[in-house]
């Protein structure tokens, strides 16, 4: 399974969480990882993605207000400016920040599925298992 047709964007500053994403998807998808808001916006503007994972709190901070620049909220607002609307999974443990991101996307007219699934919850693990299976099936069907 060497052909990586799926592109996944990940906004995450925790190396431990990045390692989880790499172990889940590294062999089946092209991963583009940003660790702060400015890097995230630049990378998102540089290509198309099938799936986007967004954390809210960046820079090693926790429970950051959404009005701060270096947050996933800034990146989520930028997604509204794009023509392409990939599936978005918000995986932050900051409930209020994550809900602000979700609300901004939905109320802003984002035309793809937006889900809030905190990192490593049973729902997060299940959806990632399902997604990985779909990607693997897609790779097998195109091989």
Image (spheres, rainbow, N blue to C red):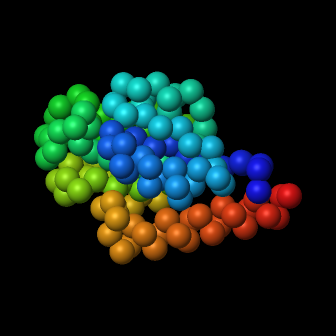
Q: Quadrant of the N terminus?
A: bottom right
Residue 50 in sight here? no
> Which residue is pictured at 36% across the width and 74% down the height?
122
Q: Residue 96: where, in percent of width, then height?
A: 17, 53
> Which residue is pictured at 64% across the width and 53% down the height?
27
* Vertical arrangement, residue 84 with respect to residue 53, above or below: above
The answer to which of 46 and 111 lies nearer the viewer is: 46
19 relative position to 36: left or right? right
119 relative position to 44: left or right? left
> Which residue is pictured at 33% across the width and 60% down the height?
119
Q: Count of labels shown?
A: 0
- The part of the image, by quadrant, that contains residue 132 is bottom right
* Vertical arrangement, residue 90 with respect to residue 132, above or below: above
* Vertical arrangement, residue 134 with respect to residue 78, above or below: below
* Residue extending furthest toward the right: 143
Residue 134 in sight here? yes
Q: Quadrant of the C terminus?
A: bottom right
Q: Residue 84: where, in percent of width, then height?
A: 57, 41
Q: Residue 33: where, in percent of width, then height?
A: 47, 38
72 relative position to 136: left or right? left
107 relative position to 127: left or right? left
Q: Residue 95: where, in percent of width, then height?
A: 19, 57
> Which residue is pictured at 30% across the width and 34% down the height?
74
- The part of the image, by quadrant, that contains residue 130 is bottom right
* Vertical arrangement, residue 103 with respect to residue 62, above or below: below
The answer to which of 72 and 80 lies nearer the viewer is: 72
């Amino acid at each position: 399974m060497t052909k990586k047709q799926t592109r996944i964007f990940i906004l995450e500053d925790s190396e431990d969480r990045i390692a989880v994403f790499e172990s889940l998807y590294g062999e089946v998808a092209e991963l583009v990882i940003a660790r702060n808001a400015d890097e995230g916006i630049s990378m998102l503007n540089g290509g198309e993605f099938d799936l986007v994972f967004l954390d809210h709190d960046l820079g090693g901070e926790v429970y950051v207000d959404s009005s701060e620049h270096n947050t996933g909220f800034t990146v989520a607002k930028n997604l509204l400016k794009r023509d392409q609307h990939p599936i978005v999974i918000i995986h932050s443990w900051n409930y209020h920040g994550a809900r602000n991101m979700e609300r901004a996307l939905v109320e802003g007219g984002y035309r793809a599925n937006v889900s809030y699934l905190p990192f490593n919850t049973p729902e997060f693990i299940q959806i990632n298992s399902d997604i990985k299976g779909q990607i693997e099936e897609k790779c097998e069907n195109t091989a």
